[in-house]
Every structure is written in C-alpha cells, then in structure tokens.
Image (spheres, rainbow, N blue to C red):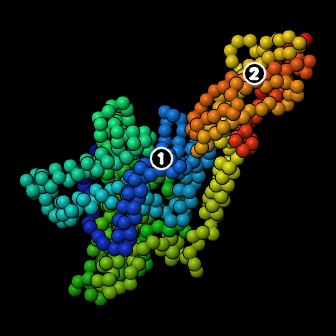
Amino acid sequence: MSSLVTLLGGQKRAPIHPLRINGRFTNFRFWSHWVLVVFLLALPWTTIHGQQSVLLDIPSRHFHLFGITFWPSDVHLMIFLLVGAAIFLFFVTALAGRVWCGYACPQTVFQHAFYLPLEDWIEGGRAERLKRDALGWTFDRVWRKILKHFLFVAFSLLVGHSLVAYFLGAKPLVESVVHLRFNHPSAMGFALAGSAFSYWAFALFREQACIYACPYARFQGAMLDQDSLVVGYDVRRGEPRGKRHKSAEGKALGDCVDCGKCVVVCPTGIDIRDGLQMECITCARCIDACDSIMDALEKPRGLIRYGTQRELEGEARGKRRLFLRPRVLVYAALLLALGGAFTASLARRDLVEMTVLRPAGAPFNVMGEGKVNNHFTLKILNKAEIDQSLTFALEGFEGAEFIVPIQPFHIEKGKAATMEVFVVGPASSLEKGKRKIRIVARDGEGHTAAQMNATFLGPRG
C-alpha cells in the first residue's frame, strides 16, 4: 500500500495489511458491496422512457434522474434533493453512526468489493504479505505486484469510464472508445483522469482517505450522541484483559484475551478497545474477529458489538432509545417537510415552459383605424417526455386580434423552439399607453400547458 507523510513528525506511515476474516457482517458487506458496484456500473446503461436513467448532461443543461428531467428552471427542485440528501445522511448518522462509511461509501465499496479481495487472492493473506515485504523485492513478490496492479488499472479504467458515462452518456462514450473517435476530447480526458483517480484512491491511498481526507469523519461528532448506534467494546465485560496462561491463574480477568485480532482485521488500523474514534468506519470486521475468538473459548458473543455508548458504558436502562430522540425527530420532520415540498413542487411544475420576449426595435407600431401592433417572441421549452401540439390564445384583451403563424405548433420532447406572434388592439383601450395581457398555451387535450403575462404598449395620447 501507499505511504503518506503524516501531519506530525514527517515520518512515513506503515502500510496496513488487514487480516482476512469471515463472519456474518463481513460476508454481508462483501455481497452488498458487489450489489452496489454492479448497480453503479450498470446504471448508465439502463433507460427509462427512452432516456438514460441517470444522465447529468451539463452542456445541454438538463439532468435525467430516474425518468424525471430537470432543467435550469427546476434548480429549486435540485436544491430540495441536495439538502434532503444531506439531512438524510445526518438522520442515518444520528441513528446508526457511520454506517454510510462502512456499507455504502464508494471508497469503502470499491475497495472492499474488488481491490482488497483481489490482493488477498494474488499476494496471499496478511502473514504471507508481511513475510514477502520483509524479504525485499524478490522475483516472487515482483510478479505478484505487477499482476495485481495490472488488474487494478483495468478495473480503474472501467470505473473511470463508467463515471464519465453519467455525464456524456453511455452510448456516445462507447462509440468514442470503440471507434477511436476523439470528438469528445474533454470527456475522454475526464475518463482517463477519473480512472487515474480511482486507481490512486482505491489501490494506493486506500484507508488514508478515511483517516486524513474525508471531512465526514471530522464532523460526525456533531451528529452523534450517547444513543447513536456504533461499534464498541464492552469494557465492563472485557477488562481487565490478559492472556490465558499459567501465570494468569487465579487472577480475575475479563473475557478479552488480548489476542489483538480485532486490530489486525481493522482496515484503518485502530484498536476498537480504545473507545469511539474518528477513524472507525463501523465496518464490523472487529465484531466478526472477536466473535470467532469467543466461539473458540465457548464464551458469549458480543464483547465487541453494535450498541450505543450509553449501553456499552452501562448507563442504559430498558430499551434502546434509537428513534424517540429530539435530534432524530427533528431530522425526520425536516425530511418529511422537504419530501412534501419536493413532491408538491414537482407535481405543480409546468411541463411546457414559455417565455415572452419583446424583440429589438420599436416597441409598437401604430396602424390605421386607431389600432396598435405589438410584436412578441415566444420561447417555448417542452420539458415533458412526449411531443406536444400546442395552441395559443390571448386573454385579458377584448377586441384584440392575436396573430399566430402556426396553429397548432408542434414541438418535440426535450426540445426548445421560438415563434413570432403579433397582437393588434385598439389604442383607445390602453391606460397611459399600456395594458396587461396574458398569452396561454394549451395542449392537444385543451389543458393549460403554460401561461405568461406580458405588457401591450401603445401611444400615451
């Protein structure tokens, strides 16, 4: 693994080789991680309503998210989603600590689903790797390193290109790669940069991202309390710890035999017996390691377990208070409020967006018989997932003539178009040279698709 100059002292950090472990939590995490890996890599290849399920099309200024298209005018909806995601993370942290880090964070998911198991398969377990490291750069160690990093690079290329597929689109990306078409040089550059970053983060930097770089580890303390679910060591049951040998006979020892297995399986290299620490990602590998020792000693499991700090310190009385706590209830209320506001805003948004502009030049033309002509440009955006046939009408100006060149006006889904219209009305109906009017667009079924207010101008006299 890579080494990182520590913030203190300038010494290099010793590589961490986690011991391979089996257990209920480790096995569950392995398979759940692979489900997430397949989901994240396959998602750009799925479609809903003919559109890529998730496509963040920045040049075209619209996002496709699971069948819903968000346009620049829908930025308030995106704010609901982003703020809701942040509060949901706070909510989960208050309930179950850093469960996101251990089970769903991309850094953990990719590293523990592919990179670490592949390293174990090629280079062997912890003891074999430490032995080879001590022998130096032998041929046996070199060819294993080369093979391992070759596969790391190949998988990182897959991850990096899949990441770009979320922004460029899966099909254009494949066409560019297969046919060596460099019509998207910036996208290909980002794909290679994303691949390089994936290789560095998952194959080299590894657990140091959680220890040094991740901001979440540093502000989690503000979201945790004594009743949050964390991985902890039962001090009352385990202490005083000690080896089971003849010199320890007659001593009142706890259940912890000080084997150190909980330390060597930890991917961040901490000792969970030292209490709750910033580096702990609640992966529960130490729980599986400790449970295997307790099984061998025929002692109850749970010396290291999921629990609340209040419970582990012996302060809990009765049932766990996971849900009925002020901060959890506040987060839940905020989530419900944001969810309701997002749903209501999404249901009320116009699927046809219309903007009324006045072109350059004279604002109006005076015609014969006391009439005035106003020229408007309609900018129309069809945000619906179907083509639209729109008809336009004028409201709020009795006796005026509304001239529309094309009626009905056909516009394809996801497309924008412009149309020039004219309003001719009597000057006598104006007040101080102006009058409010409304232009309404209706769909093929006669329902109002969009409406926009405008000002009809004329001479003041």
**Amino acid type at image mark 1:** Gln
Which quadrant of the rendered structure holds the C terminus?
Answer: top right
Q: Nearer the viewer, mark 2 or mark 1?
A: 2
Real-space Cα distance between discs 2 and 1?
Answer: 39 Å
Mark 1: secondary structure? strand
Residue under numbered circle 1: 52
Q: Position of residue 299 (x, y in %)?
A: 35, 85
Residue at x-position 74% and y-position 32%:
392
In the rendered image, which quarter is residue 424 located in?
Answer: top right
Reply above or below: 16 against 318.
above
Between 454 and 251, which is closer to the camera in this rendering? 454
Q: Is residue 7 left or right of residue 129?
A: right
Q: Position of residue 191 (x, y in %)?
A: 35, 40
**Amino acid type at image mark 2:** Phe
Reply above or below: 223 against 310.
above
In the rendered image, which quarter is residue 414 located in?
Answer: top right
Q: Is residue 54 left or right of residue 374?
A: left
